[in-house]
Image (cartoon, rainbow, N blue to C red):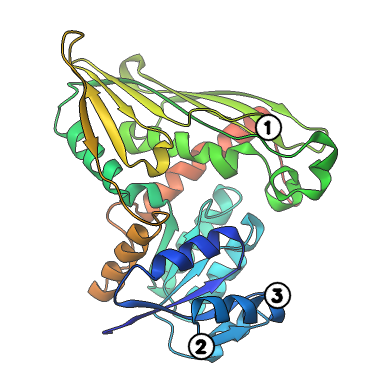
Amino acid sequence: MATFNWAILGLGNIARKFAEDLQRIDDAQLVAVGSRSAERAAAFAKEFGADHAAGSYEDTFSGPRVDAVYIATPHTGHKELTLMCLERGIPVLCEKPMGLNLQEVQDMVAAARRCNVYLMEALWSCFIPSIVEMKTLVDGGDLGTLESLRADFGFRGVPRDDFERDRLYNPALGGGALLDIGIYPIWLAQYLFGSPESIHATARLTDLGADVDTQVTLRYPDGKLAHCYSTLLGDTKTDALLLGTKGELHIHGRFHNAQGFSVLQGTDQPPENHYHSFEGNGYQFEAMAVMEDVRAGRKESARWSLDDSLLLHRTLTEVREMIGVAYPGE
């Protein structure tokens, strides 16, 4: 496997960013793309140099050898396409959220383990260099005991009269702030604190039933709290603050793909700044991690395991139940 061959299913904005970053990996190449539109597939393949363009997801694999597939369709397509690939023995990197709810993720994980095929949810933040170093410092005790976390993610969405035509606000496509961007603050809380003891959540919903302004508080042993906020009503700093017994750590915005963070230990000390700049969008790091795992014969990631995804979606599903968001078919 001197050259690692990738395929992409679903050719929207995130797929484009992923394809751009694949070009930054010397031994990776995009060989096949699949879409429900043959015209879109052909244009995407031409732009990024893929040999095979398919006008259906199934036909994506009738061309060159594929070593792994990146699934970048809307949320509602993740389970079906992941199962299709796993049954074909093709390793899968599935864009977050892996599924619409815990049951879907359980089905996907069970299929991966039954088929003995690699599967990872694309929580790319786990592989961003600044986040990797931040986690090492926290685990090493540089902040003492971690006591509290605050993280937000928000941007201004479409006007209210466009809700019905926008994927972000359409419950039939898994729309809402929580699964699209609220997943990141909750992921960070789990990444640092583990499984919550209790959850409190409240949200503002549109008339269609999508959440647009959502606050989640996770409680951990000894009363530790993680405050997780997501909104489609306006732009926020999209940063994170960690409070420990020996100091504070500020992950610069946008925290989920931050290129730096600052540590403050004592008010009379200047901040200690850590920078890990990179070119591109940042998707190359998760892609390289998948390539390393697949080449080594591993069936899941040590940094973001299938059990991690199950725990995350248990939390997300409980939050949705609290705020009253349901998707068709649930």
Q: Which residue is mark 1?
A: 212
Q: CA distance from mark 1 to mark 3?
A: 29 Å
**Picture coordinates of residue 251 (x, y %)?**
34, 31
For this orientation, the residue located farthest to the top is 268
Visible in this render: residue 93? no
- Distance in Å between CA atoms under marks 3 and 2: 17 Å
Residue shown at 50%/37% (left/top)? 315
The amino acid at mark 2 is: Asp
- Mark 3 secondary-structure assignment: loop
Q: Residue at point 28% right, 42% down? A: 130
SS for dot 1: strand
Rendering coords of residue 236 (x, y %): 54, 28
**Residue 81 appears left or right of 130:** right
- Front-most of 190 and 32? 32
Residue depicted at 32% across the width and 49% down the height: 128
Label 2 sits on residue: 51
Q: Which mark is residue 36?
A: 3
Label 3–label 2 contact, CB within 8 A: no
Residue 94: x, y in percent? 49, 61
